């Protein structure tokens, strides 16, 4: 299972999210057709931009509970003090990717980031 974990500021559009996911997939030489899931924290998963981005990428959208993100936070490669202060966990993109990828999940590398969107790619055996 291949998962794109994404974090963003509220101003991010579906296009912004999709663009960063595609950049991350390109970085790891993965075709977009191999992507299985777009993951983020639960509250963000309810935002229209995330639902639209998942539709545009033809993948399932998964919202991860903050306690699940906290459970895998020690595996995050690039913790964020901004996210820690705002959400109480040090990572949204990397942690969401790990949670949604399930058993034996691992990040392919550190998240990539623009001014408003972050994305990390994880692989795993699924839930």
Image (tube, rainbow, N blue to C red):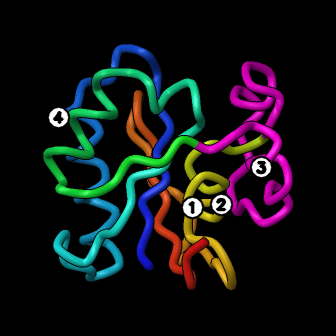
Give the mark nearest the N terminus, 1 or 3.
Answer: 3
The residue to which callout 4 is attached is 15
Viewed as shown, does residue 41 lie left or right of 47? right
Residues tagged 1 and 2 counted as in contact (Cβ below 8 A): yes
Quarter of the image holding residue 87?
top right
Residue that appears at 19% across and 69% down: 32
In primary-sequence order, the first of circles 2 and 3 is 3
Disc on res. 99 = 2
- Circle 4 Cα neighbour tier, 10 Å, few/some/many (<14 / 14–19 / ≥20): some
Magenta highlight range:
64-89
Contact (CB < 8 A) between labels 2 and 3?
yes
Q: Which class describes the residues within 10 Å of circle 1: few (<14), some (14-19), or many (20+)? A: many
Comparing 110 with 68, the one in front is 68
As helix, strand or loop, the secondary structure at mark 3 comes to helix
The residue sitting at 44% across, 24% down in the picture is 46
**Residue at numbered disc 1:** 100
Q: Residue at x 43, y 15 (%)?
A: 10
Dominant secondary structure (helix, strand or loop) of the stretch shown in magenta = helix
**Where's residue 58, x and y in %?**
18, 56
Dot 4 or dot 2: first in sequence order is 4
Q: How far, Cα to Cα, is label 4 from label 3? A: 27 Å
Q: Is residue 97 left or right of residue 116?
A: right
Mark 4–mark 3 CB contact (< 8 Å): no
17 in relation to 58, above or below: above
On screen, residue 115 versus residue 103, left or right, reads: left
């Amino acid at each position: 299972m291949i998962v794109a974990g994404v974090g963003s500021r509220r101003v991010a559009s579906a296009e912004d999210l999709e663009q960063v996911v595609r950049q991350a997939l390109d970085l790891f030489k993965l075709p977009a057709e191999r992507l299985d899931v777009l993951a983020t924290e639960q509250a963000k998963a309810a935002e229209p931009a995330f639902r639209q981005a998942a539709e545009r990428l033809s993948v399932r959208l998964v919202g991860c509970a903050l306690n699940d993100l906290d459970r895998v936070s020690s595996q995050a490669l690039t913790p964020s003090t901004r996210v820690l202060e705002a959400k109480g966990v040090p990572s949204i993109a990397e942690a969401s990717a790990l949670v949604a990828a399930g058993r034996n999940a691992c990040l392919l590398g550190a998240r990539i980031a623009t001014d408003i969107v972050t994305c990390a790619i994880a692989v795993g055996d699924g839930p």
